[in-house]
């Protein structure tokens, strides 16, 4: 569930980057135009220029300031969404035996009716026990980030100040108007760290299923950062630091969430949709020879008892 969430989020970001690249058009003289550029990029460029003037003329610090403001605004919402997802994960652990039984029934289904019945049981299991099919992660945080990402991407991509290498476009020896391997690598590392932090305190089974996303997600961030101007890589890197902080907050808060869910499940035990199959020990097969031998032993015992009387 969490794996699919990260994959869909990052796929959407990568797709949005490609979409924005095609949406902003240029005139014959090379001037960009279009709704995204006019209504998102230009205002963001004005904000960045204003912040750069206040921060010693550095566009690097201006991008960091914009990222800090955006992330601080989104942080409470993101933490709340992560908390909801963690609650869903803990609830799922209580219905895991039933879930395994239904999955086994789905696997062994031979007709469409049997498959449909198993799918209906799975939906009932989620619904009756208050478990969200989306894992508690709503679309609102992602939808809010899209316009911000679109604005920053277009503003940095088509910034005259950054493209011309004007004063303030250099940051720590890096030209923010051109792709940079160093910032792309830093973005990869910080999101790799965030993925590792996300595996702390969770069961080994879930950790195993998340291992692939620990690599896939940072790789997608790396390729988007490497293809775009370094200013966007700087935005991803600083955003990754906030993502690590958010993950650590949930990690330290997880024991409290786990205790709360356990108390809730104690008061309202999980509703049974399907009884888990309990393995039954195989019965010992008795051969005719063994039966004859046992009868002879019982008869011999009866005769011995008769003689003793």
Image (tube, rainbow, N blue to C red):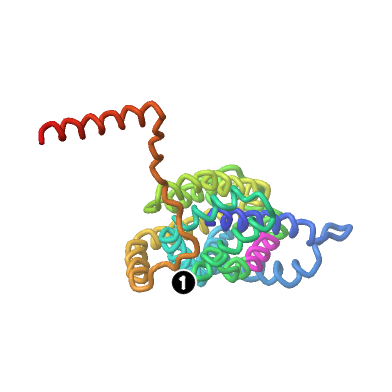
**Residue 234 sits in which quadrant?**
bottom right
Residue that sits furthest to the left in the current view: 309
**Residue 246 sits in which quadrant?**
bottom left
State the image coordinates of residue 165 (x, y, percent, origin top left): 67, 53
Q: Nearer the viewer, residue 209 or 194?
A: 209
In the displayed structure, does residue 128 sit left or right of residue 165? left
State the image coordinates of residue 254 (x, y, percent, origin top left): 36, 62
Residue 179 drawn above or below residue 128: above
State the image coordinates of residue 27 (x, y, percent, origin top left): 87, 60
Q: Is residue 149 magenta?
A: yes
In the displayed structure, does residue 66 sit left or right of residue 13? left
Q: Main secondary structure of the magenta part?
A: helix
Residue 32 in view, yes or no: yes
Residue count near mark 1 (Cα–Cα under 10 Å), binned few <14, some 14–19, many ≥20: few
In the displayed structure, does residue 307 sit left or right of residue 183? left
Quadrant placement of the C terminus: top left
Q: Which residues are magenta?
A: 146-156
């Amino acid at each position: 569930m969490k794996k699919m969430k990260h994959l869909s989020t990052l796929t959407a970001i990568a797709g949005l980057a490609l979409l924005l690249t095609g949406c902003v058009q240029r005139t014959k003289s090379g001037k960009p135009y279009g709704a995204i550029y006019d209504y998102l990029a230009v205002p963001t460029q004005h904000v960045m220029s204003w912040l750069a003037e206040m921060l010693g003329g550095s566009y690097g610090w201006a991008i960091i300031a914009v990222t800090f403001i955006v992330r601080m605004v989104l942080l409470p919402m993101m933490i709340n969404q992560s908390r909801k997802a963690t609650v869903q994960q803990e609830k799922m652990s209580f219905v895991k035996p039933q879930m395994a039984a239904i999955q086994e029934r789905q696997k062994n289904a031979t007709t469409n009716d049997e498959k449909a019945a198993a799918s209906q049981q799975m939906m009932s299991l989620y619904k009756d026990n208050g478990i969200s099919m989306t894992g508690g992660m709503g679309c609102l945080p992602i939808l809010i980030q899209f316009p911000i990402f679109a604005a920053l991407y277009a503003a940095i991509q088509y910034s005259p100040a950054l493209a011309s290498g004007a004063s303030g476009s250099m940051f720590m020896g890096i030209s923010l108007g051109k792709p940079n391997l160093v910032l792309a690598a830093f973005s990869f590392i910080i999101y790799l760290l965030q993925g590792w932090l996300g595996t702390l305190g969770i069961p080994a089974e879930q950790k195993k299923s998340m291992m692939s996303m620990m690599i896939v997600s940072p790789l997608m961030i790396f390729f988007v950062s490497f293809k775009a101007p370094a200013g966007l890589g700087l935005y991803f890197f600083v955003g990754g630091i906030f993502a690590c902080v958010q993950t650590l907050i949930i990690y330290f808060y997880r024991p409290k969430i786990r205790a709360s869910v356990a108390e809730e499940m104690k008061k309202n035990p999980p509703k049974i949709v399907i009884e888990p199959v309990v393995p039954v020990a195989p019965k010992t097969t008795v051969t005719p020879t063994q039966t004859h031998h046992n009868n002879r032993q019982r008869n011999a015992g009866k005769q011995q008892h008769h003689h003793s009387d």
